Image (cartoon, helix red, strand yellow):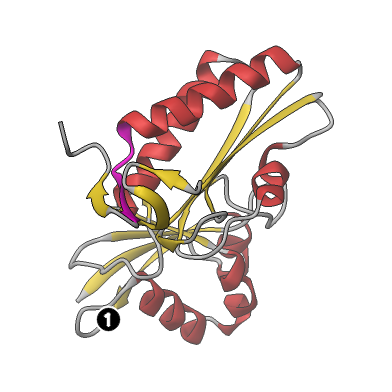
Amino acid sequence: MRVRVLYFAVLREKLRLEQETLDLSGSPTVGDAVTAIAGLHPEVAGLMPQVQTAVNRSIAPAAHVLREGDELALLPPVAGGAGPRKIAVLAEPLALNEVIAAVEGVERGGVVTFAGVVRRHGHHGEVIRLEYEAYVEMAEQVLAEIAEEIEREWPGVHVAIHHRLGSLAVGETAVVIAAAAPHRAEAFEACRAAIDRLKRRAPIWKKEIGTHGEEWIGTCP
């Protein structure tokens, strides 16, 4: 099967290519394609760990399965450096300092953060664990849309959102958000708007397993 690969900035300059067609076999993932590209173009192989990927103009993880005719864009680090992504849905522990690093800047005097942590008491007695499931590709797209909306509504604000997947014990962090702005008022408002909109719109589901039962939160009357 064939996919169209787009290159930008430092990748485009090093390869002297804006795009090319990549032939892949079987049911390749984005990760397979990136590995193949690194093999074809060793001059950019060292940059691959810093590259973000998008399929058909939506951010896509390495596990995303490609289809015939897909457009795969390789996005090198932006001007701020290779630092943490502003938007991420991850099956690994979250770090508040990473979302802060994604939004902070010398022109932004106010940085407000939110961390959602698994609490001891829930709907069914004491919580044993929470299980988070998501439609990852769509969730990342929705989180990006939320961040972009907020940044338009509060000019000068920068927002980063990371959400956890998988099984979380009491005390573990499920979501971290950072909002940075020239002044504290906008940063507070933007951070609250981000968590409120995430809860309403992101395709991320939570199952609570407690000492007295279990439940997908939000599904019971």
- Quadrant where the image shows the C terminus: top left
Q: Is residue 44 visible?
A: yes
24 relative position to 166: left or right? left
Residue 4, quarter of the rendered image: bottom left
Q: Determine whether, in the image, residue 94 is placed left or right of residue 215.
A: right
Which secondary structure type mostly characterizes the magenta part of the structure?
Answer: strand
Identify the amino acid type marked 1. Leu
Instruction: Check residue 208 for magenta coloring.
Output: yes
- Quarter in which the N terminus is drawn: bottom left
Q: Please state the horizontal and vertical placement of residue 71, each as a whole percent of the image.
A: 30, 58
Q: Can you name the residue that lies furthest to the right here?
A: 106
Residue 120 point in image, percent of width and height: 50, 49
Look at the image and tell me whether residue 156 can be seen: no
Please name the residue shown 76% across and 19% down the image. Answer: 182
**Foreground residue among 9 and 126:** 126
Residue at x-position 49% and y-position 22%: 193
Extreme left residue here?
Answer: 221
User: Which residue position holds label 1?
Assistant: 24
The image position of residue 162, as x and y in percent, is 52, 48
The magenta span reads 201-210
Residue drawn at point x = 47 percent, y = 84 percent: 40
